[in-house]
Amino acid sequence: MSHETYCKLIDGFCSLIGFDDPASLYERAELAIDGEDCVIMHGGPHNEDDIAVFCIYGQPPEQDADLILQRLLEANLTLMSPGRLRFAVDSVTNDVMVTGMMPMSGMSSETLLALLVELARQARDWRQHYFLGAINEHESYDCLPVSSAPKARRLS
């Protein structure tokens, strides 16, 4: 895999969404997916086989920010494995985001689009309940409610 592979992935992605200047997105693709801000870019020289993915969820409300951020950290425990996305906070804007390096092997333009659409849906859902209330059992999330997260053990 290489930057060339990434560019081909972007070419196919742009073809799917009807954007006729894929070369303008090779360096950094800032996208509005169903109204949500997402960014994709090549993983760089140290991650040649990966694509970096970011989806901005927005800022948590001040009233429950500590608890909301704790929930996101707990959710990160369930997401801890290579090629998985995880929650982060932008140090400049304080926006919560989902970010990570995803392997390009086996990724098609269609799967990339489906991933971004799903992340956009999750961003909207997060702003509805911030993972504080009961999550609808019939919805699919890449994180678990706090009660399902693994319990920490003291290492001594």
Image: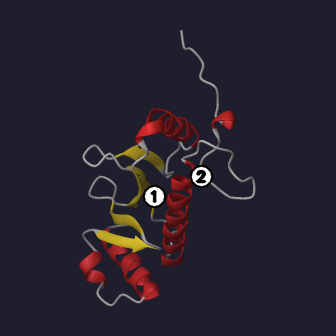
Dot 1 or dot 2: first in sequence order is 1
**From the viewer's perspective, is residue 78 above or below residue 127?**
above
Per the image, the residue denoted by label 1 is 102
Label 2 crowd (10 A; few <14 / some 14-19 / many >=20): some
The residue sitting at the front extreme is 63
The residue sitting at the top extreme is 156
Label 1 crowd (10 A; few <14 / some 14-19 / many >=20): many
Query: Residue 129 at what x, y percent from top left?
Result: 58, 50
Per the image, the residue denoted by label 2 is 142
Nearer-the-camera pick, 57 or 60: 60
**From the viewer's perspective, is residue 26 above or below residue 121?**
below
Left or right position of 121 against 3: right
Left or right position of 90 against 65: left
Nearer-the-camera pick, 56 or 14: 56
Residue 43: image quadrant is: bottom left
Q: Secondary structure at mark 2?
A: loop
Tell me the quadrant of the picture where the N terminus can be found.
bottom left
Q: What's the amino acid at mark 2?
A: Asp
